[in-house]
Image (cartoon, grey):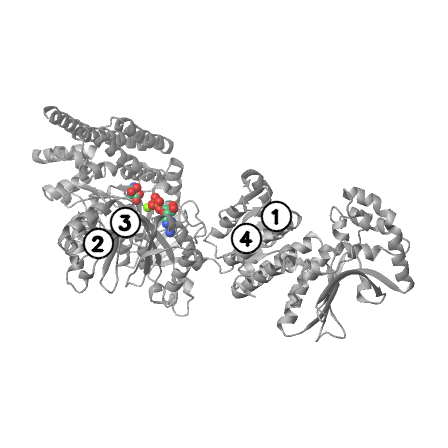
Amino acid sequence: MASLSAAISHSCSHVALAHSTKPKKIYHSQCRTLPLPHRSFICRMSFVSRWNSRDTSNARVFASVKEGILLDESVEKVKLPIGDTWSVHKFGGTCVGSSERIKNVGDVILSDDSERKLVIVSAMSKVTDMMYDLINRAQLRDESYISALDAVLDKHRSTALELLNGDELGNFLSELHHDINNLKAMLRAIYIAGHATESFTDFVVGHGELWSAQMLSAVVRKNGIDCKWMDTREVLIVNPTSTNQVDPDYLESEKRLERWYSHNPAQIIIATGFIASTPQNIPTTLKRDGSDFSAAIMGALFRARQVTIWTDVDGVYSADPRKVSEAVILKTLSYQEAWEMSYFGANVLHPRTIIPVMQYNIPIIIRNIFNLSAPGTKICHPLVDDKEDNRPLESLVKGFATIDNVALINVEGTGMAGVPGTAHAIFGAVKDVGANVIMISQASSEHSVCFAVPDKEVKAVAEALKSRFRQALDAGRLSQVAIVPNCSILAAVGQKMASTPGVSATLFNALAKANINVRAIAQGCSEFNITVVVKREDCIKALRAVHSRFYLSRTTIAVGIIGPGLIGSTLLEQLKDQAAVLKEEFNIDLRVMGITGSRTMLLSESGVDLSGWRELQKEKGEVADLQKFVQHVHGNHFIPNTVLVDCTADSVIASHYYDWLRRGIHVITPNKKANSGPLDQYLKLRALQRQSYTHYFYEATVGAGLPIISTLRGLLETGDKILRIEGIFSGTLSYIFNNFVGKRAFSEVVTEAKQAGFTEPDPRDDLSGTDVARKVIILARESGLRLELSGIPVESLVPEPLRASASAEEFMQQLPHFDQEMSKKLQDAEDAGEVLRYVGVVDVVNQKGVVELQRYKKDHPFAQLSGSDNIIAFTTTRYKNQPLIVRGPGAGAQVTAGGIFSDILRLASYLGAPS
Ligand code: ADP
Ligand code: ASP
Ligand code: MG
């Protein structure tokens, strides 16, 4: 004990010594003129109020407050010109995080052409944390507080060396060293005591602001401009409250401000944020992140024109941009909306910033110091024409914010109903343990009261409640005091949203769609917010789900591409080229969330950059896993719709369509396997599609990009009756027979087609006719026929003996041996003035399909084809004498991908895209 007090008195004398030897002219002269009792007062208070002696002659002010008015009378008073000549700026920690940034802040201040400027500055970024850390270490009797303090010194010394020179540098460094010495002594005392009082702590942690304000003011002065710095503890007087907050004493602060200004008139004042004094002149703070509050109070005291809060984001986002990458900047917010957003966790603004400025109608502008071109967010009273009449639901919800780490407490029991004073007893018990109730919800049956408190307080609260209600619990009047730990609060904020029909339904619908269970609900009667409690692990998902529901275009679609082969990659290319136009002109936002091949897949959280997807796949690709892929693309709840585009020809992939559609995933494909596969599965798939609002489009399965399925559907839906569909469905076979003329050998034309890339690698895949048969089946089923692939006669052009040839090469070698048969058919046709064409036919009248080589007169439309064109003739009751003909290129990656793309756009229009 003896050594403890000795150490403290040693520390004291050290502080006092450091203090009294400080080379401050005014202070010394002041001290000398003061009567002895006052000097001893200052020395006694030197731990906590050395700030009285700063070089702005403030010691005099305080001396006069304490000791009389003699000194005040000796100075000619300059009246404080309050009003809108003042503009207030507040710079957050990141704005002044380095010498470069402080310089930049200086430029921003100078570029404001307001007549008078008050600047509130935070500590350099991380410094306040460092200061709290010093206290912690010292309290824990950890010697490392010394080296940690050295780091604080180094940070500021090196910043000052980079920024200042001459007297300014000398003055600042001597202040800094002086402060550090004091802090060292103080921390030593804390180390010895193993405890820091609140005022000791507040005194220590506020130094970051003292240093940044002094450096910034010196930087502004370097430009030859009159600029004073203000230790706000001399002006701002606050009263502590029982809730770890402080309340400004405006009257007293105003008096002190007038007095301060009368001694320090200046056009530019750089003031410390965060710190203040109690009415007893004990240093205190406005608590963490309190500089915004400082700026608002000062703005109110000066009746400033506006308060600009400079930070590191472009303004207030519709949700925390770290959690929702889709968040958008809000142009304006009402004071109430801003308050609700900040209360519920949007830490871009301290919640208490609003009230001081609101009473004088002073707007707050939130701006980004790193992006001066962004106009920021303006917080003010709602504009007159910003009424809610006729506004869409979406714009009534401004933003979303969350508070993590809360727990719910549910006090339940039939004995609560109609018993006056129950709520009083519950919240009385909560108050007794000093816990902060974040939200309350009571069912109207009065059967239960449920409220949220910070996780760390829940245990104490529950125990207090159990003990307070022991008797009621024992008697069964209360059934339980239950805790639901690990929760988060999600608040939707917007003027009048809660009173507008439909908004909360939309909100809860979005949560339900994302499969999120809501634990509790509260709606402020203020109508500014709806608050829900969800499991903590669901919080981000919930936030994204509701945000996307209100903010994303309804036609934002998460796209998963399966099979980035020739067609898939061409589609990706087309999507890339068209994405911006679609978004800007049609409000269709397509996000490729994943691309999977058979071996590797590429997943993205917000959309693959399509200009470099191949490189990304190489760098970041992972082993393909279809289930994981689908889960990723669909499970991404910030996008309201999902479509999987199957660009493979794989029947295994096709077998998943049913399950995907059932889960609400739209499917688009050129893959023929599902629609030409087993009939029962096809019927099941189509039945499901008809029942649900989930879409399945497959235009590119027939005729690539040609409008064949859609033409057929259009005819059927408008009541036409299909009699027959006949066509050349294979681009390859179209090419072959368009060129198989005169004396040419069939094998020669096949070789030519193969070399031109018109055939499959093994031309037998085309010549066998199976592909055409699949198209016939698809059209037949679409027309209402219940046919199986195996039920269609297909005339194969692969000579019987070559069907089992080992390789494509061997087949091509052997093919000339069979030319004669084909030449004969050609000759016969030509002799009759006809041409050969390989066609598929759906004979709806006789419920049959067939694929065969047919002869057509030379003036028939099928005889007029060139290249690899497809042609399809629909004979219907309306188009009986003259069939409806669709003709055009029906093969190739570009047109097939184009067909898929147009299905995607059709989906978007079904989902509500503008036409
Ligand atoms: P400063 O140090 O400038 O006071 P803060 O870190 O206190 O800055 O506040 C800015 C940060 O608030 C942003 O960097 C952002 O990550 C976070 N933030 C949380 N919610 C929001 C929101 N809705 N809008 C903007 N920023 C938000
Ligand atoms: N520097 C203080 C803090 O970090 C106050 C502020 O920056 O708003 O809490
Ligand atoms: Mg802040």
Q: Are marks 4 and 2 in contact (CB under 8 Å)?
A: no
Residue type beneath disc 1: Gly
CA gap, disc 1 and disc 2: 56 Å
Element type at marker 1? Answer: loop
Element type at marker 2? Answer: strand
CA gap, disc 4 and disc 1: 13 Å
Element type at marker 4? Answer: strand
Dot 1 beta carbon under 8 Å from ligand 1: no
* In front: label 3 or label 4: 4
CA gap, disc 3 and disc 4: 45 Å
Closest to the observer, 280 or 604: 604
* In front: label 2 or label 3: 2
Q: How many residues crowd around disc 1 within 10 Å: few (fewer than 14), some, or many (20 or more)? A: many
* In front: label 4 or label 2: 2
Closest to the observer, 115 or 813: 813
Question: Which x, y percent locates residue 793?
Answer: 75, 60
Residue type beneath disc 4: Val
Residue type beneath disc 2: Gln
Return the residue at label 3: 293
Q: Residue at x 43, y 48 (%)?
A: 372
Question: Which x, y percent locates residue 426?
Answer: 18, 55
Q: Which mark is residue 559?
A: 4
Q: How many residues crowd around disc 3 within 10 Å: few (fewer than 14), some, or many (20 or more)? A: many
* In front: label 4 or label 1: 1
Closest to the observer, 603 or 781: 781
CA gap, disc 4 and disc 2: 48 Å
Q: Which mark is residue 563?
A: 1
Return the residue at label 2: 480
Q: Is residue 526 left or right of residue 768?
A: left
